[in-house]
Image: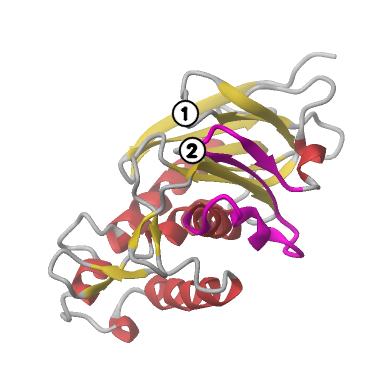
Amino acid sequence: MLAPPRRAWVEQIMGMPVSLHLRGPGLDSAPVRRTVDAVFALLREADEVFSTYRADSEVSRVNRGELAVADAHPWVAEVATLCGEARERTGGWFDTWLPGSDGMRQWDPSGLVKGWAVERAARLPWHDFCLNAGGDVVVSTAPGNPPWRVGVEDPLSPSRLVEVMALAAGAAATSGTARRGAHIVDPHRGVPTAEVAGVTVVGPSLCWADVYATAAAAKGVSGLDLLARTGYEGLLIGRDGLVRVTGGFRRFRTSGPVIDP
């Protein structure tokens, strides 16, 4: 069987490469080009609103006391509500209120925003697609089409993969030290987590996969316990090199022919 036509676009947004891969007919058409432009435009707008690295972002202005959440872009209140829910769902292991350089607590929703924004962009009309933002991936395929293949990088040796997953629909999010070093903070102790090199979480929503991956990394080598009865599965690699997986993770492992993004 011939593979369907495919095309990819890549832009640098949120300080990372964001790639969009489409499969299907008409990929050079004006409607597809408009859809692609809309995806990247939404992600750029999310960066403008939520970036903690931009002094003019709405999150930065909220943290300086210049802007109330109620007066900000409507996305800010939506994300603030989700951050509160995420803290409750994870027993406090996901917390967006962290100590700032001045000793004051600062609101940093970055651990939720990327997954939320990419998932929001993926609500636009599609062919088969794989949208990948710095390793956080959301995919969809039409019935009968082959799944996408998503690799899990070894955070202790980034040139190799520890796992390859077949995903027909849903999302995979990864948190760890491979690219940004020890940046995930244990919210209960206020120090960077030291036990975990990387966590990948797979499930229906990229927003919540991202939250659970961050929370599991913060909790340590027992972090996958947070996924019990959530509908999400995960793989955790400790600084000791041991690989731990949840019981249901095996169903995402590749079997049969799949198409690389």
The answer to whether residue 76 is above or below residue 254 is below
Place residue 257 in its image quadrant: top right
Place residue 169 in its image quadrant: top right
The label number, if any, that marks residue 217 in the structure image? none
Question: Could you say which is closer to the camera, residue 37 or residue 197?
Answer: 197
Task: Give the residue displayed 47% in from the left and 47% down from the top.
Answer: 195
Question: Could you say which is closer to the camera, residue 191 or residue 180?
Answer: 191
Place residue 134 in its image quadrant: top left
Question: Could you say which is closer to the camera, residue 35 or residue 196?
Answer: 196
Identify the residue position indicated by label 2 in the image: 239
Secondary structure type for disc 2? loop
- Of labels 1 and 2, earlier in sequence is 1
Identify the residue position indicated by label 1 in the image: 156
User: What residue type is disc 1 on?
Assistant: Leu
Q: Is 176 placed left or right of 12 in the picture?
A: right
* Mark 1–mark 2 distance (CA, rounded to whole Å): 8 Å
Q: Is 147 placed left or right of 113 in the picture?
A: right
Q: Please state the extent of the stretch shown in magenta in the rendering.
A: 218-246
Magenta-colored stretch includes residue 232 = yes
The answer to whether residue 87 is above or below residue 257 is below
Q: Nearer the viewer, mark 1 or mark 2?
A: 2
Badge 1 density bin: few <14, some 14–19, many ≥20, Cα 10 Å: some
Q: Is 85 placed left or right of 231 in the picture?
A: left
Secondary structure type for disc 1? loop
Q: Is residue 142 visible?
A: no
Badge 2 density bin: few <14, some 14–19, many ≥20, Cα 10 Å: some
Q: Position of residue 128 (x, y in %)?
A: 69, 36
Q: Position of residue 171 (x, y in %)?
A: 64, 47
Task: Give the residue displayed 60% in from the left and 35% down from the top.
Answer: 242
Q: Position of residue 154 (x, y in %)?
A: 53, 28
Marks 1 and 2: CB-CB under 8 Å? yes
The answer to whether residue 231 is above or below residue 244 is below
